[in-house]
Image: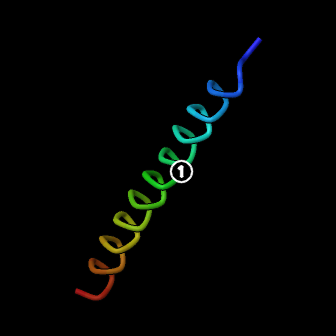
Amino acid sequence: MYSDADYVVMGQDFISLLKGNTVFRNKKLNESLRSEIN
């Protein structure tokens, strides 16, 4: 079984993963938008 501390760490990892994915996706989106404009 997981302890509360394990859940907190897993939650933080998950959140940072989501944030990372969002940043990555936005970067890809911006790049594709730029190439559309140019």
Q: For the image shown, how many numbered marks are present on the structure?
A: 1
Foreground: 18 or 1?
A: 1
Foreground: 3 or 33?
A: 3
Q: Position of residue 14 (x, y in %)?
A: 57, 41
Q: Is residue 16 above or below residue 28?
A: above
Foreground: 38 or 3?
A: 3
Colour scheme: rainbow
Foreground: 20 or 38?
A: 20
Left or right of 35, for residue 33: right
**Measuring 42% from the left and 51% from the top, which residue is drawn there?**
20
**Measuring 62% from the left and 24% from the top, which residue is drawn there?**
6
Q: Is residue 35 above or below residue 7?
A: below
Crowd class of label 1 (few under 14; some 14 to 19; many from 20; radius 10 Å): few
> Which residue is identified by label 1?
18
Q: Position of residue 13 (x, y in %)?
A: 52, 37
Q: Position of residue 8 (x, y in %)?
A: 62, 35
- State which quarter of the image contains the N terminus: top right
Q: Amino acid at mark 1?
A: Leu
